[in-house]
């Protein structure tokens, strides 16, 4: 029976793909047995990963996860019998990254591009994806300008969550674990992400702790590694708590230098995304009692998720490290693409067009390393965020968190159709009404 476009859209966007169909990463197609309507050539997937500089730790981790995923999928028969072939380009500056995106699209003729972490690169590549009609599934690389979405109408771009989610979760954790603090100071990176996080953290914490005051945040350029003057300036402010949205190697370096100056002996801390380099946060310089966020994946969030356990084993054997959150972003976008292609094929019995894959991706839910994740109808990711309080009580030489609190993105990200300010005003009104009861 033929299906028209309306039927296809209605069925393809039906949401969660069954765990039984996707948990095993395939397995129903044998080599050389591509079904009717499916080309025999490999599926080309462009991967754009940072491999040097401040983004190297999460970028290399995500690239490693992509390679492991491709190997496992190919061992299971590929996508509908087609072998997966990764075409890797390094994420660098915005101008170069756009040129590499064009190269993958026009010269390599990849079926889809995944990757990118930089907000500036996301804004540039997002526009290019629409112009070239190339499907781009980002890892991070939000397309926000401040807290406002810079690409409100996206078709070919499937974007990460908003910049400020981990800061919102950090503010909730601060109000819960440190309800009596009165003065907060901040140290953040001087670009969209750092400023969005500070603004959001202050606004949400003020909702739940109206007695708190905020010192003006210190903003430093991304990639800064000398924090002595900033640490002295923070200490001089005499805050009860220091908030930071550092997310890469700068977290490690800052904590090392802060330990040398005993900054956190009498001051509490909230590092909303520092868990992005969790196994570099050694016990010798990272104190217990800090709030620490791990973005969308904490490698010990459960012992009962086979996909995670299997991945950690392979990843550790290969790298002698434990995976960070960017691995889960990389894994999820590939899982989602594969599931969308297979969903389309089940309806049409043909390898789908990019436009059909897009329809199937909207509203999809698939198993990833951090549990089920998906895309909203406005092309934004849905996932969980993991946060907790640092502890030394573990078998590693680095800190972990206990207890672990999980925030679904639906509870800390503005809904579809809302601006950040509209959402905040409604939330603030609800909190005020609750205080009256």
Image: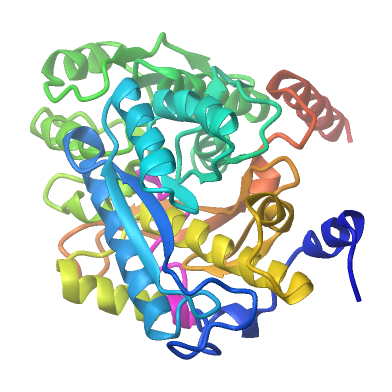
State left or right for residue 14 relative to residue 195.
right
Q: Position of residue 22 (x, y in %)?
A: 58, 78
> Which residue corresponds to the image point at 79% horizontal and 59% vertical from the top-left?
13
Q: Using the rendered view, name the quadrant where residue 299 is placed.
A: bottom left
Q: Position of residue 38 (x, y in %)?
A: 58, 73
> Which residue corresponds to the image point at 21% horizontal and 72% vertical from the top-left?
316
Kindly give the residue lying farthest to the left in the view shown.
260
> Which residue corresponds to the image point at 71% horizontal and 67% vertical from the top-left?
344
State left or right for residue 28 relative to residue 375.
left
The secondary structure making up most of the magenta span is: loop
> Which residue corresponds to the image point at 15% horizontal and 62% vertical from the top-left?
397
Q: Is residue 287 visible?
A: no
For the N terminus, the quadrant is bottom right
Q: Is residue 412 visible?
A: yes
User: Which residue range is magenta in the image?
Assistant: 290-307
- Looking at the picture, tell me which residue is in the foreground, 149 or 163: 149
Q: Position of residue 65 (x, y in %)?
A: 33, 63
Q: Using the rendered view, name the quadrant where residue 18 is placed.
A: bottom right
- Looking at the picture, tell me which residue is in the foreground, 241 or 226: 226
State left or right for residue 286 relative to residue 27.
left
User: Residue 356, relative to residue 394: is it above or below?
Assistant: above
Q: Position of residue 334 (x, y in %)?
A: 48, 61
Check residue 293 for magenta coloring.
yes
């Amino acid at each position: 029976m033929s299906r028209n476009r309306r039927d296809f859209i209605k069925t393809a966007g039906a949401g969660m793909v069954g765990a039984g169909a996707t948990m095993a990463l395939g397995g129903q197609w044998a080599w050389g047995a591509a079904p009717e309507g499916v080309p025999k050539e490999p599926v080309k997937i462009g991967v754009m990963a940072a491999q040097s500089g401040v983004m190297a730790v999460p970028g290399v981790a995500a690239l490693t996860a992509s390679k492991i995923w491709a190997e496992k999928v190919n061992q299971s028969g590929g996508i509908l019998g087609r072998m997966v072939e990764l075409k890797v380009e390094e994420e660098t500056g915005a101008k170069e990254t756009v040129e590499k995106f064009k190269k993958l699209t026009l010269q390599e003729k990849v079926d889809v591009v995944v990757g990118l972490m930089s907000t500036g690169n996301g804004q540039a590549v997002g526009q290019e994806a629409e112009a070239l009609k190339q499907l781009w599934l980002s890892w991070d690389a939000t397309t926000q300008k401040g807290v406002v979405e810079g690409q409100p109408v996206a078709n070919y771009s499937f974007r990460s969550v908003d910049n400020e989610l981990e800061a919102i979760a950090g503010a909730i954790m601060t109000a819960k674990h440190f309800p009596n603090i009165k003065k907060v100071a901040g140290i953040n990176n001087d670009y969209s992400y750092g400023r969005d996080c500070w603004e959001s953290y202050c606004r949400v914490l003020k909702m739940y702790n109206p007695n708190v005051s905020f010192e003006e945040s210190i903003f430093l350029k991304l990639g800064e590694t000398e924090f002595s003057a900033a640490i002295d300036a923070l200490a001089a402010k005499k805050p009860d708590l220091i908030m930071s949205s550092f997310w890469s190697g700068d977290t490690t370096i800052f904590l090392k230098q802060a330990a040398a100056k005993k900054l956190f002996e009498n001051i509490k801390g909230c590092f909303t995304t520092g868990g992005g380099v969790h196994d570099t946060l050694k016990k010798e310089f990272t104190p217990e009692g800090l709030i620490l966020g791990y973005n969308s994946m904490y490698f010990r969030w459960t012992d009962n998720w086979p996909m995670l356990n299997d991945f950690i084993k392979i990843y550790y054997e290969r790298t002698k490290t434990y995976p960070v959150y960017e691995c889960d972003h990389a894994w999820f976008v590939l899982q989602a693409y594969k599931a969308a292609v297979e969903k389309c094929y089940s309806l049409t019995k043909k390898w789908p067009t990019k436009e059909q894959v897009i329809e199937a991706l909207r509203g999809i839910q698939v198993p990833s390393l951090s549990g089920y994740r998906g895309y909203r109808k406005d092309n934004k990711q849905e996932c969980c965020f993991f946060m907790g309080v640092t502890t030394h009580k573990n078998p590693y030489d680095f800190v972990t968190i206990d207890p672990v609190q999980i925030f679904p993105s639906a509870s800390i990200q503005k809904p579809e159709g809302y601006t950040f300010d509209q959402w905040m005003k409604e939330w603030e009104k609800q909190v005020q009404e609750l205080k009256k009861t």
